[in-house]
Every structure is written in structure tokens, then in C-alpha cells.
Image (cartoon, coloured by chain):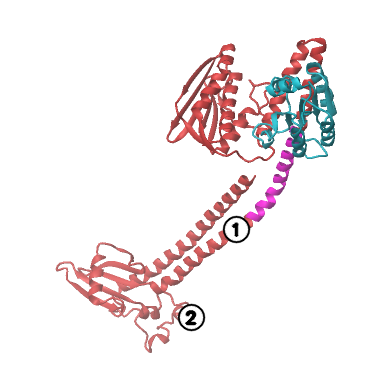
Amino acid sequence: MRILFAAPDRDLIECYRKIFETDFGETVTAFDGAQVLMLTASESFDVAVLDRSLPRIKYGRVLERVTAQGIPVIALASASSGGENMAQMPGERAVLTYPFMPEEIIGKIRVIEGSPEQAENRGKGTNGDEA
Amino acid sequence: MNKAEKKFRWYAILVIFVLLTGLLVIINGVNFTMAAQDADRITEQIAGRQGSFGRMEDGVNAPPEGGFNAPPEGGNKDFRFGPMGPDSPEMQESIRYFTVSFSEKTKEAKTVAYQISSVTEDEAKTWAESLLKGETGWTRGTYRYRVYKYRGQKYVTVIDQARELLPSFRILLISAIGEAVVLLIGWFVLKAIGKKIYAPIREAERKQKAFLTAANQEFRVPLTVIGGNMELIERRYGPDEETRSTRRQLGKLGDLVDQLETFGLNGKETARAEECRVSEIFRSELGRASAEFASRGITLQQEIAPDVTLAANTEDVRAMIGELVGNALKYALTTASFALKKENGHVLIEAENDTDLPDGSVDQVFDRFTTLENAEGSTGLGLSRVKEIVKALNGRIAASVSGGKFLLTVTL
């Protein structure tokens, strides 16, 4: 399973890259919206974990482009319950609010990993290459 | 802060209103009392002359020769140079009055004096008869009367004091208008003053909110990183007491961060009200916690009335009940009981648990970051969060410790 993990905090990225690589396989990281768009345009991913506060390009635009490629998105938000940021935006498969424990995000990725859509993608060997 | 500012303005205007009204009541009261005293002096003089200024049998106070333009014999300077008071001869001439005598034997009414055009003689007699039971006082608003006896007859004298009372009524009217104007001006002045007084407090509150919101946001990612790194350490070296302890502390910090945010420290508006099923929420929260109560050896008692609903945001009510249950879970020694009922149109929630706290007031439990002596290690936010929610629902909350029982009462 190939994961794209994008967040502005380098420690966070480094820590979760190690966890994801142990649990799921190759994990590509990005620090801003522009990198995400560049990577998703040229490479394929099974899931994208995107921080909603990514700099440089508005999150809404990044989300639109990433979901258009058929990549399921897990959003990371800063606000807690009751806040507008907690609500799931169109295209997002799940939302996690900081702070979360590794098992929570691993659980979300596993749900996507086990979905029929992913099984189909795995059968084809890639994600987003159908077109 | 807006509420406190409004409260200050209302209290200040209330104090001004009470003081001003008190002062004006005293001034006008004294004024009307003096007017009544003046009127009584006139009726007394008429009574002394057996009902009429014209019947001066003993010659005392007789009009001086040459009319009222000349001073009386002996020169009473007050009449000439002083104000035209009730004793002055001119006043006697200008008084509108009538006197009716009633024979005590035959009850026959006889007009003794009639110097008034506003009533007929017959009306005067009827009017006087209706006053026989009294002694002195006001009648028909601006008329002063006196009842007295002379040679086996009862006399009733009625004088018209409308002219004399007119200045008093004017003062009363001016007082009322003046008070209204002062209150209106006072309202705007207080508004301006209030804004100035509360400006630094408002600014401090804004900064506090901004700081807490920023701090809250800044805590979130580091906590996630620490959690992730703990996971990596445990994977590499295996979990031990230190890593488990760190995880527990991480959990506490996570709760604190969530609680800080749900306080509305970032200025969120209260969520929209809806038909909230309180009974169901209560049962669900107690159901979720029942195993935890049992594992801690706490006997859980509940008396939840069915179908209790409330116009409120369900998440707020759930959070409030969750905090009440969580509080009992943390601090109950052996028993915890919960009651939900509807009383006089209000929703009443009672949460009680046994405690080793001494009897007394425990209102400080609702203050942010304040904990009681049995709550070491707590964030001190749980019950203050409950109070915030209760306040937002226009309800009341009270806490007390009595006879080894800690009781929280919420009325919504």
C-alpha cells in the first residue's frame, strides 16, 4: 500500500512515516499543497493523509485535485468536537482531529485498505492509472 | 463581558432611579404637605369666624378702614411687605369657599357662606353633608375641608385650593419629566463610561482567549508527535511502565486540550437548539459508564424519568451529562446516584455521590482550573464546563456537601 502523508510539521511527518512504512509499506511525504499536487499528478497512491492547514495552496483545491485522481483522503484537522473543522468535507473519507494516537489513524487507513474499492485497485496493481 | 457590562449599566441606572425618585418623593411630599398646612390654616381661620370671613363678631382682623390697601391698625408689616400668605386679608378676599351648617337636632342644612361659582348652593349642601363624618382633608382632588362645631351646630367649610396647588403640581410634573430625562442621559453616559471601564477587561479577555486558542492549537500537533514517537519506542523496545505512564499523561493532556476548546475559548457561538431527548441521553451515558462503576466497586443508582425532553443542542446536553457521570466515576467512594425528573415545567437533574469532603460550600468547583482537595491531578475543567453549558441553556447549577454526600443539582 502506498501512502502520501502531507503535513507542515517535519517531526510529525518523520514519526508517522516510520509508523506507516512499518505497517503499510512505502510512504511518501510532503510539506505543502504544491508538493501534494505535484506528487499526485506524477505518482499513484492508495491513500492520502492530508493536514488541512497545508501551506501554499488552499486545502479545498488540493482536496479537489487529489480526490479527482481517485485517491481516498483522510483529513487531519486542528479543531475539536463542535467546531466547523470537525465536519467531513466532500471527498474526504475520514477526519481525524489532533491530537490522535497512532492506532486511530492506522485504524482509518485499515478501513480504506479493506474497502472493496481498494481491493479492486490492488487487483489492477495501481491507483488512478485506469484512465 | 457584554453581559457584565449590561448588568453594570442596569444596576447603575437602578441606583440612580431609586435615589432620584426618593429625593423627588421627599421634595414633592414636603411641598404638598406644606400646601395642606396652608389650606388648614385658612379653614381654621374660617372656623374661628364661625364659618365666614365676613362674620367678625369680635372685630379682630376686621378689614381696615380704606380697604385692604392700607395696613391694619398697629401696622402689621407682614401683610404689607411680606408675601401674600394665608393670613393676609387679600387672601381672605380671594378664597373660593363655602360653609354649610347642620343643626344637630333637626339636621337642617343652612348656607353660612357661599363664595364659590363652581358649585351651586344645593350642590354645596349635598357635598358638605357627605363630609360630615370626617374632620379635615382633601375632597374632590383640590378642595380642602374642615368639620367643626359651634353652638350646637356642625359646620362644614370647603375651600378651593386649585390655584394654590397648581405650582405644586407643576413641580411634580417637572420632577417626573426631569427624572426621565436624567435617566435617559444617565443611560447613555453609563454606556459610554461602561465601555471605557470594561475596555481593558474586554481586551484582556480577548487576549486570554486568543492565547488559549493559539496555545490549544499549538498543543495538538506536538501531542500527536509524542504519541507517535511513543508508539515507535514501544515497537522498538517493547512497552514498559514508563511508556504506559507517558501514554496515560498524553491521554490527560489530550482531554485537557479538548476541554479547553469546548469552553468556547475560541469564541464559538452556542450551538443551535433542537428537541433533545434528555432521558435517552442520560440512560445511554449511564449505560456506557456502568461497567466502569462496577469495576471500581461503586454502586450505581438511577431514577431516570421517561420521555424528558428539552429544547437544547443534543451534543451540549450529552457533554454535560457525560461530565456529571464522569465526575461521579472519578470521585465517588462507594455509591453514586442520578435522578432526572420534570418539576414545574423545569428539567431537574441530581447527581449525588458519597465523599470524604467536609460539609460546606463548594461553589469553587465551577471555577476553571479549580479543584477540591479530593481531586488532585484533575484539570479542574469538567464541572466548569458543565456550568458553561448550563448557563448557555439559561439554567442553574448548584453544588453542596452535606453529611458525606456531594450533590450537584442542575435546573433547566
In the picture, residue A9 is in which quadrant? top right
Counting from the top left corner in percent of width and height, residue B219 is at: 76, 29
Residues A5 and B146: in front is A5
| Residue indicated by mark 2 | B81
Residue B33 shown left or right of residue B311 in the figure = left
Are dots 2 and 1 in contact, CB under 8 Å? no
In percent of the image, x 60 and y 49: which residue is there? B6
Numbered label attached to residue B186: 1
Residue B32 shown left or right of residue A24 in the figure = left
**The N terminus of chain A is located in which quarter?**
top right
- Is B149 located above or below residue B81 in the figure? above
In the picture, residue B19 is in which quadrant? bottom right
Mark 1 residue type? Gly
Same chain, marks 2 and 1? yes
Q: Main SS of the magenta segment? A: helix
Count the marks. Answer: 2
Task: State which tag comes first along the sequence, 2 or 1.
Answer: 2
* Chain letter, colour cyan in render: A
Mark 2 residue type? Phe
In percent of the image, x 72 and y 47: which residue is there? B200
Counting from the top left corner in percent of width and height, residue A91 is at: 70, 33
**Mark 2 belongs to chain:** B
Q: Residues within 10 Å of mark 2 (few under 14, many from 20)?
A: few
For the record, the magenta segment spans: B191-216
* Chain letter, colour red in render: B
